[in-house]
Amino acid sequence: MIQLQRRLCLLVASVSIASLGIAGCTPQPQTNAQTSQTQTDVQTPLREPDVVYVPTPQEVVDQMLALAKVTKEDVLYDLGSGDGRIPVTAAQRFGTRGFGIDINPERIQEANANAQKAGVTERVRFLNQDLFTTDISQATVVTLYLLPELNVKLRPQLFEQLKPGTRIVSHDFDMGEWKPDRVVQTQEGSTIYLWTIPEEVPANLQ
Ligand SMILES: C[S@@+](CC[C@H](N)C(=O)[O-])C[C@H]1O[C@@H](n2cnc3c(N)ncnc32)[C@H](O)[C@@H]1O
């Protein structure tokens, strides 16, 4: 019985990944944007997403922003931004300017609706782009909730484009050989990693 449930879960998840980029077996946030969306609004992702949509719990978002010591002076990029909760929260709490990048236009619609609801549309922008081809050179903080292999794939882009001192915070996944400055375990069972872009790329990561 449990095996069947697991198989059904896998089936629903793979159909969702292929068609919408949404995880069928993970809790989905019920935003106004989602409930008011009609069939005709739904667009196709630019290409198949590298990872399905699973939102970071709000308590973990708060701790990610605290760990990165986000302020009004920062420019935050959330790569794979989902419903936009990380840039929206940073803008609401600290006045941070933020960008959310997501390959799925449905997520961009939700994020824009959430920014509007939060009254932060002047501080945040959501772009329907592939995070691997996005220019992130203006960022002073980058947030991630991807997968370990995607973090490692992203590493050269981070070193190439980001200024020294830029903070990177990742929910649950590390960067392989690049050791974090800090690791925090949350009460919710998440792990948050913090790195800072050094003046020079460490020899073992070149
Ligand atoms: C696990 S969710 C994280 C959402 C959000 N950052 C959060 O923490 O709540 C990953 C998101 O990445 C997006 N995504 C997957 N591959 C992508 C790519 N190559 N470029 C941009 N976004 C991508 C998915 O559509 C999904 O919304």
Image: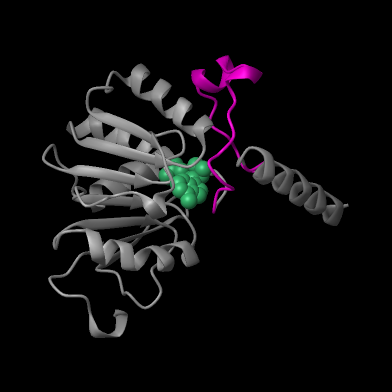
**194 shown above or below 77:** below
Question: Considering the image in quadrants, where does the C terminus appear?
Answer: bottom left
Residue 131 in the image, given as x and y percentages of width and height:
40, 50
Residue 194 in the image, given as x and y percentages of width and height:
28, 61
Residue 155 in the image, given as x and y percentages of width and height:
34, 67
Q: How many marks?
A: 0
Question: Is 42 included in the stretch rendered in magenta?
Answer: yes
Determine if residue 84 is in view. yes
Rendered image quadrant of residue 40: top right
- Asked if residue 26 lies left or right of residue 62, the reply is right
Q: Which residue is depicted at the point 60% across and 38% down?
A: 27
- Asked if residue 6 lies left or right of residue 72, the reply is right
**Front in this rendered view, residue 158 or 197:** 158
**171 shown above or below 106:** below
**Front in this rendered view, residue 9 or 139:** 139
Q: Which residue is depicted at the point 55% across and 48% down?
A: 49
Magenta span dominant secondary structure: loop
Rendered image quadrant of residue 100: top left
- Asked if residue 206 lies left or right of residue 84, the reply is left
The residue positioned farthest toward the bottom in the image shown: 204
Q: Which residue is depicted at the point 50% across and 23% down?
A: 31
Q: Which residue is depicted at the point 65% across and 19% down?
A: 39
**Front in this rendered view, residue 102 or 85:** 102
Colour mapping used in the image? one colour
Read off the magenta span. Answer: 23-50
Determine if residue 186 is in view. no
Residue 74 in the image, given as x and y percentages of width and height:
16, 43
Rendered image quadrant of residue 157: bottom left
